[in-house]
Amino acid sequence: MSNQKFIPRKLGESIIELPSKGLAKEDFIHSFKEYYVHLLGRDEESHQAHYAYEALGLTVRDRLMERWKETHHTYKQAKCKRTFYLSMEYLMGRSLSNAMLNLGVNDVATQAMYDLGIEIEELIVSERDAGLGNGGLGRLAACFIDSCATLQLPVIGYGLRYEYGMFTQVIENGEQKEKPDHWLRLRNVWEVKRQECTHRVHFGGHTEVQTDVKGVIWVDTHDVLAVPYDTPIPGYQNSTVNTLRLWRAEATEEFNLDEFNSGDYAEAVAEKIGAENITMVLYPNDANENGKSLRLRQQYFMASASLQDVISHWVGLYGEDFSLFAEKNCFQLNDTHPSIAVAELMRLLMDMHDLSWDKAWEITCSTMAYTNHTLLPEALERWPVPLMQSLLPRLMEIIFEINAHFICQVSAKWPGDTDKLARMSIIEEGGQKQVRMAYLAIVGSFSVNGVAELHSKLLQKDLFSDFYNLWPEKFNNKTNGVTPRRWLVGCNPELAAFITKTIGSDWVTDLSLLKKLAPYADDASFRKQWRAIKQSAKQELADYKKQEHDMNINVKAIFDVQVKRIHEYKRQVLNVLHVIHLYNCIKHSENDNRVPRCVLIGGKAAPGYEMAKTIIKLINNVAAVINGDPDMHGKLNLLFLPDYNVSAMEKICPGTDLSEQISTAGKEASGTGNMKMMMNGALTIGTLDGANIEIREEVGDENFFLFGLTEEQVVARRKHYDPESLIDQDEDLQQVMKLLECGHFNQLEPGIFNRLIESLKSPDDPWMTLADFRSYIETQERVENAYRDQEHWVRMSIMNVAHSGKFSSDRTINEYNQDIWKLPKLPVKPKRSGLVSLNK
């Protein structure tokens, strides 16, 4: 936000009538004034942009509300099949600009605010990011629900309304420090509380068998209320508005009045605090037992409330007849986190609605679909059996029974194979028994998918090979995608307008049409305009970094960007090794003619992940040396971008020249940052990992900078990996490691990088970073040579955008629907005369 005071000009006149809900500029002004002056109690003397943002947000939400109601009515009247997307994360970012874009009122709203003396950008940037996610998983969920609405599919998203989202990252002395992200501190204008749809979720207690009543009952529980808050999810200019329902945990009673009156104030409100803790913080640190318990509470709370909600809706329409339930409902489990839903649906159908085990299991296995997002075995959740028995005793009984039935099935398929039985059991034996939640999801689902072609193949060949051999028909691939509305039209309007001018506007909802751009790559005039747009985006990114973080960036340099969660397998360290190599080359060359390069790295480390935090410290220490060296000025910069989030990515994407996708082959499930940058004209340097493989297939090897070992080569090399010999044989690598080991980047902090250096030199390094160093350095030289020929570079940039159509989340969701969900597409037509239909 600019440093100028926010001073609206024309708000003095009295407003007494109800605000209009039309889409004309005058209607926007009318509604805005009504909210700003009457609801929020502001006037022209108010100098805080946030209140004007709230007024405009409410004005836009008004225009969505009737469409939202009509969408709900359309689905209800059709009694259509629905999908319920269960995800612990939704990394939504800001909603105002996206809602205006999808509603088709950008120009009207901008002009209305201008007439009031308000710069609309001031209002947009005053909105807090809804950081209800950790990274790609949550951002993917946000893209998916956008595409579901745009494709007019009856899909509802379910998740948790965390009071505190992903932590705010600050850098102090080069180190990450975490501060709470209280994104709900001010009004969230996009949500509507639905108190009447509250459900009760059970924890603790014990089970009893009552043969004369209804079998097993769960008693003496500690209950928590799940209160829903709904957010409208508008499709792109099509009148459909789907719903994202987020649950907030509340106590069944506000406080214990007797304890309060007796003076025990803390105990009086303990139950309330304990209940609300469930949705207080996104991903509590589960390094201790309390953290594990809270994380499990969160997952069960979300699953139980969501399933109860769906069943309540079903009973309202069909009573206690569940014969068509599987035909009308599908639950998509976004990763392992919601997999407890398999056991919870069984509990609800049997204990609450008197279905037999066989019937309940038939319904469960016909409605659950599981998406796996990781190839790292340690990321597949396991919950200790004692914890499950204490917290969810009835669920643990059901899981034991599910496993017993499943083990019988495995034994029938492979008689006497005790090793296979042990490998496939949902209950992992050993020192402390644990529940393998991914296995529960596979056993209880009719569909299991990976998120890129390589990822899905590796799931079938390695991680879940036993299950694939048992049920090959369950397994399928759904390569991820991102919504082009936010990640091209919204974040890069200049490029989007140029594309529309060239090939028309239909590409916004059919990204495959971008292939029409390919012939223009040979047009010199077109390339000139393309390059000017890219330079403008780079200047905007440089200005943004200067304004937000006081960073100076040379816009003539290659903008070399790696922004993603900090993790060893994503190999930010390999990027830093290359930067140190460049630094060393410049220091020892009098006539170095290298292309100027600005390397930008951003991302957050999990609070308990010490090695990732050390990597952030290394990046900042190396940056301090390089950026403070006069020999580097105009030639090399390294910048760490603090507090990377969705809104930051919206600035970064358009200005990126080179997209770093350098994970160890076979470790990244898919990636979506690679798609966003490609879609905005960046070229990729990457390994054959995740969706990089498919990006290269689409754009062609000549427009992709490939390096490194393949997944098969990584597996073969691991048996005799010797990083010390690699260092001995490579003079450049020797120089880089010497600078690291001698403390050149940590002269006042001796030894702080020893563990990281030891991990790089260890033959047991699972990420094999040094094995790819030489290939990476040589490929980066190819990048420099290509960038020198700007005509050729711009041509490659155009070809990347032209071939990015596959990576639209619209394509991904269409495939989910065709192969798994099988939902009807239901157009929605608003009926109120005051609302204009956006359907053409």
Image (cartoon, helix red, strand yellow):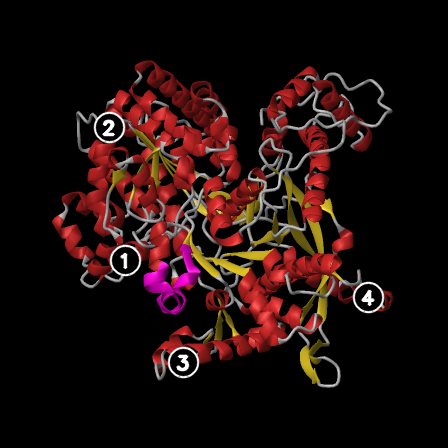
Classed neighbour count for the residue bearing mark 3: other residues with Cα under 10 Å, few (<14), some (14–19), many (≥20): some
Q: Is residue 187 visible?
A: no
* Three-letter code, disc 2: Ala
- Element under label 4? loop
| Mark 3 → mark 2, Cα distance in angstroms | 58 Å
Residue 486 numbered mark, or none: none
| Mark 3 → mark 1, Cα distance in angstroms | 45 Å
| Mark 3 → mark 4, Cα distance in angstroms | 53 Å
User: Does residue 63 appear to the left or right of 674 in the view shown?
Assistant: right
- Element under label 3? helix
- Element under label 2? helix
Residue 256 numbered mark, or none: 4
Q: Earlier in the sequence, mark 3 or mark 2?
A: 3
Classed neighbour count for the residue bearing mark 4: other residues with Cα under 10 Å, few (<14), some (14–19), many (≥20): some
* Residue, disc 1: 758
Rendered location of residue 297, percent (x, y)? 61, 64
Rendered location of residue 7, percent (x, y)? 70, 20
* Residue, disc 2: 786
The answer to whether the residue labelled 3 contacts the one labelled 2, judged by CB atoms less than 8 Å apart, is no
Which quadrant would the C terminus be assigned to in this image? top right
Q: Residue at x 64, y 50 (%)?
A: 80
User: Does residue 7 appear to the left or right of 345 in the view shown?
Assistant: right
Q: Is residue 314 magenta?
A: no
Q: Earlier in the sequence, mark 3 or mark 4?
A: 4
Classed neighbour count for the residue bearing mark 1: other residues with Cα under 10 Å, few (<14), some (14–19), many (≥20): few
User: Does residue 291 appear to the left or right of 773 in the view shown?
Assistant: right
* Residue, disc 3: 411
* Three-letter code, disc 3: Ser
Q: Residue at x 59, y 32 (%)?
A: 102
Which quadrant would the N terminus be assigned to in this image? top right
* Three-letter code, disc 4: Asn
